[in-house]
Amino acid sequence: MSKTIFTNGKIYTLDQNQPLVETVVVEDGKIIDLGNHDEMILQWGKGGSTIIDLQEKMVTPGLIDSHLHLSGVAFNFLDLDLTGVTSKGEMLNKIKERAKSTPPGNWIVGMGWDENLFTEGSIPTIEELDYAAPHCPIYLKRICYHAFLVNSKALEISGYYPSIDVPTGGTVVLDTVTKKPTGLLLESASKLITKYIPEKTYAELKSGLKQTMNFAISKGLTSVHTNDPAYLGGLDQTFQLYDQLINQEQTGLRCNLLIDYPYLSRLKEREMNVGFGNAQLQIGAIKIFADGAFGRRTALLSEPYHDDPNQFGDAMMDQQTLYEIVKEARDFSMPIAVHTIGDQALENVLDILDQFSKVAYRDRIIHTSLVRHDLVKRLADSSWIADIQPRFVVGDYPWVKERIGEKRESYLYAWKTLLSAGVICAGGSDAPVEPVDPLLGIHAAVTRRAPRETHQGWNEKEKLSMLEAIKLFTIGGAYATNEEHVKGTLSRGKLADMTVYSKDLMTMENPDELLSTEIEMTVINGEIKHHK
């Protein structure tokens, strides 16, 4: 097979043996050599090699998102997207517009609302939702996926009545005076509704996923770790969708699939253990939830919420149940990936993991949002990964300070502390909770503020350097799936995945320049999958 030579670039390899080069030589999807332009062209430039001029642009190893939900982003293409809505009025108007084109009785499903962004009004009431779409049932997921809004028609279809059994861990929020539903559901209470919403067709899901993959590639991502079976019809259909798009249709994006615990038995039946697949598509860890989120005070804390002294948050399961789940995964030699936001949830998870032997692949502690100093030392284990989402700073501040109080703020999103203690960290977005764009994640890691803000950053001592932030989305992402030997750096023998930028991130005097930086090119397996 002919060689491709990517040359005339400022290529940051992140390989300490050869950190900066001008040229990368690729054959059969792998890097066979790299160095300065003249030497590489002299050695490899003959015999019909294809030469790609990088025009002195900055290049890094391909960017990796260590935790997102491609299915959720796909639904944003297919459903009502409420991401970024800044007032109750705007949200209700979007619902009204969608209702105009929705036949009576058909569901209006949407996602992405966040009342913390509202400059006017609060969460819509059930009466307001009824008025906005009087002929349609409504189901709207909050951006965190831990709170949901429904109207009266949705409750009617679900057969709701005041003494209905609500799934464990869930809450139907009632008006304090009338004791009637407000339309707000928390956590697993959503299951009262979701079983009545018609599923998307296979063709619709595939179309949305394909759009999402191409969108992710356009943002410079070459690999993602995505959690989807609960939203894509189970393990079998999820794997089929990804297999068709990646292996058969060659969409390009490399995907590691986190599998929700309820599908573990099906994994066993199909003998699909962690690592099953190929370099393009693999089975990953078993995903479970230890707690909820700060927004609705369901993240599990060791001390009460500052703004609600009677509330500690919610454990999604007791310790014995968590033990049994981890044991079942371990009996199948599987690592786990645990949604863990509060410090008590983290302690609970570590207490369980300490009781089991390690497996070949690393366990993943997803989010690790609030980490007490005594827990930092425990996290510094080479068999554990802290999957962090830098953009949570943008989504959660300043309101989260009132939730947890000033005393605990030093524990919140303490990335510098984690890295300094030797904790292996991988960077992700949790999209669609936060934007897919990894440059926004890097910006948040470096500035600890929203793009529109000009202050020095929330808890600024935890800011990362540009290099540290880039490593989160490259080397860190590779470690999370035990693929550091094949990706994460640009080195001989590794996969030829590269991201090319319009500006040099390493020499920026102002990190806000990231906001106007464009992805010039995304290269996966040595093939250009995106070109501006």
Image: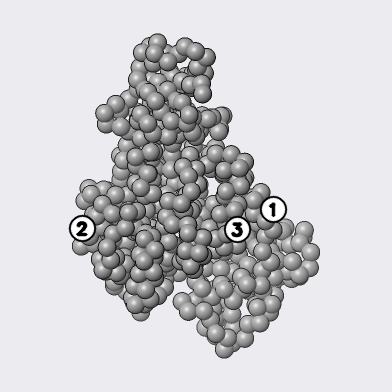
How many labels were placed on the picture?
3
The residue carrying mark 3 is: 237
| Image coordinates for residue 286, horizontal then vertical, percent | 43, 61
- Classify mark 2: residues with Cα within 10 Å, few (<14), some (14-19) or many (20+): few
- Classify mark 3: residues with Cα within 10 Å, few (<14), some (14-19) or many (20+): few
Q: Is residue 184 above or below residue 406?
A: below
Q: Does dot 3 land on a helix, a strand or a loop?
A: helix
| Image coordinates for residue 326, horizontal then vertical, percent | 36, 68
Q: Amino acid at mark 1?
A: Ala
In the rendered structure, find residue 203 and report the number of the disc placed on it.
1
In this view of the protein, which residue sits in the foreground, 57 or 130?
Answer: 57
In the rendered structure, find residue 377 and report the number of the disc placed on it.
2
Q: Measuring 50% from the left and 64% from the top, which residue is drawn there?
A: 269
Residue 294 visible in the current orientation? no
Between label 1 and label 3, give the one nearer the viewer: 3
Dot 3 and dot 2 residues touching (CB under 8 Å): no
Q: Amino acid at mark 2?
A: Lys
